Image (cartoon, rainbow, N blue to C red):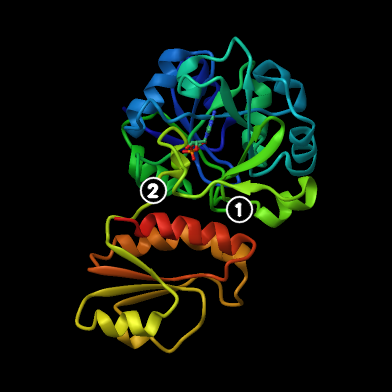
Amino acid sequence: MFTQISESTNQAAHFLKLGKAIAIPTETVYGLAANIYDEDAIRSIFTLKQRPLNNPLIVHIHSFSQLNEIAQNIPEAAFKLAEKFWPGPLTLVLDKTQGIPDVISAGKPTVGIRMPNHSLTLELLQSISFPLAAPSANPFMRISPTNPERVFEYFEGKIPFVLDGGECANGIESTIVGFNNNTPILYRLGAISVEEIEDIVGEVEVMNNENSTPNAPGMMKKHYSPRTKLILTDNVSDEIELHKGEKMGLLCFNESNLEDSVFSMKLLSKDQNLEEAAHNLYEFLQELDSQDLEIIIAEKLPNLGLGNSINDRLQRAASE
Ligand code: AMP
Ligand code: MG
């Protein structure tokens, strides 16, 4: 199959209407998208990603008017969050309506929904009559792509079309919030910090690794991983000392003079900007992963704001 990369939303719509899965840009990471009402197309997403079927997809909508088509019994707090953060990197897990195929929600009565903040994808969604289900456009367990070239590397010859929306602005996945009796629960740390969520709805419970279940797979212990072994540490220089003689890569947040002790070094943000660090995270991991290193040493970020979300991803990448 020939894989076309283009900025044409008309072309994208054409393939979607034919029942194909295509790649779309969002502000978080690229997604692999299909018509939510076309079960064969949705199943093809699972096959392409080699994603287990117990792993639900996120439904992408372009307006609040589409929300009632997908979800019901929507808690007040969900509206507050949506009003504040949509379009944007917030996924709400809500009770689904009857018409939503079970394959999207992994058989659960709830469905993840968000309005992405990317002009091209919003334009695409407005031009078609159905919402799109889209998980990240990476094979299961691999690093999420934040530019069209990485998507192409993963899926060349397997999908007909990549909608080219340039680099993803945020660079890590959406924050996922669900509800238990109308009380918000944070299922996955992401591009919106816990602090920002709490500013709107007050203190929220954060699900941690231990109580995560296999059917909330964004929360799986090992995820978002390079193939190279990765170690996450507070003390980079000690860790480098321990691995002396090995071909090392360093992913760091603080500037240091350790460049000479490693084969390759990537500084997430020159001025310690957490947004910039999130934006660079996956592409830098990809680059390090392609250098035939024996080990990647990653420096822990400060545990606040987006630092929390980035540490979460690095922890999962480091998990055996
Ligand atoms: P991805 O877009 O690849 O990050 O995958 C979508 C993620 O959304 C899944 O990994 C789940 O963690 C989450 N998700 C989607 N729908 C639900 C749901 N109904 N209940 C819990 N988590 C969900
Ligand atoms: Mg994913």
Q: Residues within 10 Å of mark 1 (few under 14, many from 20)?
A: many
Q: Name the residue that disc number 1 marks.
A: 169
Residue found at the far left of this picture: 245
Give percent across and percent down for residue 167.
54, 52
Regarding ligand 2, which quadrant of the image does it lie in? Answer: top left
Secondary structure under badge 1?
Answer: loop
**Discs 1/2, front:** 2
Q: Which residue is painted at 73% across and 25% down in the image?
A: 74
Label 1 vs label 2: CA separation? 21 Å
Secondary structure under badge 2?
Answer: loop
Q: Residue 13 falls in which quadrant of the image? A: top right
Q: Which residue is painted at 45% across and 14% down in the image?
A: 39
Within 8 Å: ligand 2 and the Cβ of disc 2?
Answer: yes
Q: Name the residue that disc number 2 marks.
A: 223
Q: Residue 288 falls in which quadrant of the image? A: bottom left
Amino acid carrying mark 1 in the image? Ala
Give percent across and percent down for residue 189.
57, 50
How many badges with numbers are in the image?
Answer: 2
Pick the quarter of the image with the C terminus: bottom left
Give percent across and percent down for residue 82.
75, 37
Q: Which residue is painted at 58% across and 44% down in the image?
A: 174
Q: Which residue is painted at 49% across and 13% down in the image?
A: 38
Pick the quarter of the image with the N terminus: top left
Question: Is residue 205 among the parts visible in the rendering?
Answer: yes
67 relative position to 242: left or right: right
Give percent across and percent down for residue 290.
29, 60
